[in-house]
Image (cartoon, grey):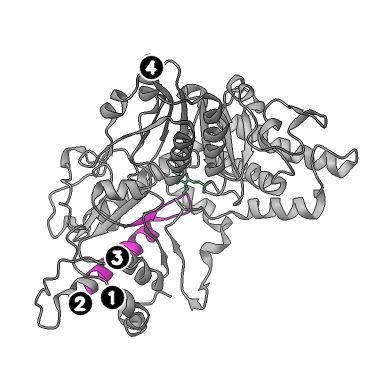
Amino acid sequence: MRYSVSILLPIALQYASPVLSFTKRSGSMSAPRSKVSQQHMVLKDPQQTEETANWWMEYEFAHADVAQKCRPDFNILSTTTIGEKKTPLVYLDSAATSQKPKQVVDSISQYYEKTNSNVHRGAHTLSRQATTAYENARDSIASFINSNSRNEIIFTRGASEAINLVASSYGRANLKPGDEIVITEMEHHSNIVPWQMIAKESGATLRYAPIDFEKGGMDVDHFISLFNEKTKIVAFQHVSNVMACVNPVKDIVKEVRAKAPEAVILLDACQSVPHMKVDVQDLGVDFLAASGHKMCGPTGIGFLWGKENILNSMPPYMGGGEMIDQVTMEESTYAPAPARFEAGTPPIAQAVGLGASIKYLEDIGMDNVQAYEHEIAAYMHRRMSEVDKVNVLGPPVGEDRAAVCAFYVDGVHPSDLSTFLDMEGVAIRAGHHCCQPLHQAKGISHSARASLYIYNTKEDVDYFIEKLDSTIKFFLGLAKGEGGEDQGDDEFVPFI
Ligand SMILES: Cc1ncc(COP(=O)(O)O)c(C=O)c1O
């Protein structure tokens, strides 16, 4: 059963009064609404008349069976109780972390019930089995991203650790004052802060390419103009977790190779590997970072892919067991990759779970995943852009974009939106999404974000849109005051 805003309103007001008291019309949140280019429509966009305004009602996805088939595997999606509340769950926060199918959950419990042991070190059967399970997961990743060799896959705690590994190990060994690291303003903090840290330590300069908000993506020409002989590292996202744009990796790689022959390229593929076929050899980068928990896998696991010769030229990131060749009291020598970068007992059960999540995605087929997400992304984007006062960041309707819509509403704080939507059972994210520089460049402090994955349906999107629309109307009604007059306070005070 869905609860309506009117039923929840008194409760909502109780919860939200401290929130509401800070929500005022925002000067900084009122950037002009980006123009929607009609000729780029993927979904047919007839002139909006009374009849065509309801175009979405009969709309059908060609690949709807992707969600229909996989949805029963995600028990959490049929939950009716979240915390203290009885509510359905419309989960629109998969860019933060995806839900996990029962196949993944089962693989982890079965590992603990039947195979649990330490890896690489026991002469007993269980240890051999655990080692096989762990190393099989490495093979699965290697084939999933078309790695040249299984030795190029390093298990990490997540993408953040993968990027930190490269910044610390490669950066420390190769950067000196005068060198340059080039990234973009749209990066996740995980692909900014490690570079700031190593730039400070090494004396290298960190340079940022700006975002073209009109176009809804990175300013590729500007990015390319920053590459030169001083460039030693180029790092950027494949797909933005806020802008939803898909960056032209191969074009950028070509320019780096031509202009910055000494540079290595790291691709943050957190938002692409779970959603599309990613082929590291085809992309031509040197390193790629991804997280397991965004691709139906468990938390606490991700991976770094790196070219084997580069990995073996890098010093270890951490010292400890497993990563050595020989240890004497005076010094140590190190094992080659991947062991060199996997000190200590690794996240074995998590690796097994990640292996199961890759099998799960492969069984659906990454082409099907991508085709379905493309449809539902375009659908949600167009529907959101038809909600009054909603400004969606990223490429305009009809252009290629990921299944992510970060948005802001003039006069309504994103956290108010997410709090109210949460009371209706809709989980969206509000905040800076670990992209403060991106928000600063746009001149807003926060945004809300709805993000989709294979299990989301048209009904999820329709329900979200209905509740988003009524929530916005409610807040804008409040802002106008009882007499319908705009209170006219342009100052915006964020409460987080
Ligand atoms: C684009 C991007 N990069 C990096 C990260 C960090 O990933 P992890 O949580 O695996 O460290 C995220 C997670 O939100 C992300 O979306």
Label 1 with label 2: CB-CB less than 8 Å: yes
Give, as a three-letter code, the residue at label 3.
Answer: Pro
Residue drawn at 46 percent across, 74 percent down: 87
Query: Which numbered disc, 1 or 2, marks the residue that appears first in the sequence?
Result: 1
> Quarter of the image containing the C terminus?
bottom left
Q: Residue at x 39, y 61 (%)?
A: 428
Does the stretch in magenta take in 165? no
Q: Residues within 10 Å of mark 4 (few under 14, many from 20)?
A: some
The amino acid type found where label 2 is placed reads Leu
Is residue 460 found inside the magenta-colored segment of the image? Answer: yes
Foreground residue, 488 or 238? 488
User: Of circles 4 and 3, which is in front?
Assistant: 4
User: Can residue 439 be seen in this snapshot?
Assistant: yes
- Label 3 sits on residue: 494
Secondary structure, mark 4, is loop
Q: Secondary structure at mark 3?
A: loop
Q: Earlier in the sequence, mark 1 or mark 3?
A: 1
| Label 2: which secondary element | helix
- Residue marked by disc 1: 20
**Left-right relation of 250 to 347:** left
The vertical placement of 194 against 226, above or below, is below
Residue on which the image places disc 4: 229
Q: CA distance from mark 2 to mark 4?
A: 57 Å
Which region shows up in magenta?
A: 447-474
Query: In the rendered image of this protein, does residue 444 appear above or below residue 144?
Result: below
Q: Of the residues shown, which amino acid type is indicated by label 4?
A: Glu
Label 4 within 8 A of ligand 1 by Cβ? no
Q: Nearer the viewer, mark 1 or mark 3?
A: 3
